[in-house]
């Protein structure tokens, strides 16, 4: 059994509890691995587990972004496709964001650069769609940031209210808001 087999339960754990809140006991229970097996698969311990999850998340985000960039159609169609994929990743707003969870507590010191890279990839993907549609590069970059802010804020609100409706509303409205002035 490879490391990758354990990525989904680890992702869920770190999303739910953050870096500091995940214990070996929780990891063992979620993965079905004993302590010795955990260290066999992840000799670097919890840091390596998070790193493995971040690599998988990075690949998933790049795939979402690349698919949206390569999608047929205008900017609005492409951004809708990206938002549909993001909606699936966050289970319609019912799953919290791993990146936000890692920026709390001591995880920030360990994973700040990786999280920054992932956020930049996401912002750049949105901006690239808008630039391709003719938007000024600086404005497109700001809109990319606004898009990530809107999604992340809606995720936090959905989690805090225990209600995915705000996230759903943002995901539905975001493509048109980002394309404002293009149509």
Image: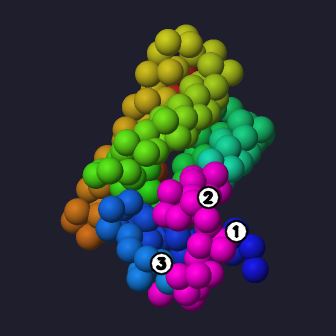
Mark 2 crowdedness (10 Å alpha carbons): few <14, some 14-19, many ≥20: some
Circle 1 Cα neighbour tier, 10 Å, few/some/many (<14 / 14–19 / ≥20):
few
Which residue is found at the position 49% from the left and 36% from the top? 113
For residue 6: magenta? no
Q: Nearer the viewer, residue 180 or 6?
A: 6
Specify the quadrant that holds the N terminus: bottom right
**Where is mark 1, residue-wise?**
4
Q: CA distance from mark 2 to mark 1?
A: 8 Å
Quarter of the image with the C terminus in it: top right
Q: How is the image coloured?
A: rainbow
Q: Position of residue 77 (x, y in %)?
A: 64, 41
x 59%, y 40%: residue:
79
Which stretch is magenta?
29-57
Q: Is residue 160 left or right of residue 81?
A: left
Residue linked to disc 3: 27
Q: Residues within 10 Å of mark 3 (few under 14, many from 20)?
A: many
| Residue 39 shown in magenta | yes
Instruction: Identify residue for label 2.
Output: 52
Decide: is 85 above or below 4. Answer: above
Name the mark nearer the viewer: 3 or 1. 3
Contact check, label 2 and label 1, Cβ < 8 Å: yes
Choose the circle earlier in sequence order: 2 or 1: 1
Q: CA distance from mark 3 to mark 1?
A: 14 Å
């Amino acid at each position: 059994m490879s490391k990758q087999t354990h990525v989904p339960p680890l992702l869920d754990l770190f999303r739910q509890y953050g870096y500091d809140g995940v214990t070996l006991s929780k990891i063992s229970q979620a993965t079905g691995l004993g302590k010795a097996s955990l260290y066999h698969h992840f000799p670097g311990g919890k840091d390596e587990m998070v790193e493995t999850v971040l690599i998988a998340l990075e690949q998933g985000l790049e795939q979402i972004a690349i698919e949206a960039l390569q999608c047929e159609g205008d900017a609005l169609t492409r951004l809708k496709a990206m938002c549909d994929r993001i909606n699936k990743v966050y289970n319609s707003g019912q799953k919290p964001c791993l990146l936000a969870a890692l920026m709390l507590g001591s995880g920030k010191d360990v994973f700040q650069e990786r999280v920054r890279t992932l956020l930049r990839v996401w912002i750049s993907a949105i901006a690239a769609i808008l630039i391709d549609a003719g938007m000024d590069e600086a404005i497109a970059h700001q809109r990319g940031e606004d898009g990530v802010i809107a999604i992340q804020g809606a995720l936090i609100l959905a989690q805090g209210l225990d209600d995915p409706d705000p996230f759903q509303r943002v995901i539905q409205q975001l493509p048109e808001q980002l394309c404002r002035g293009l149509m």
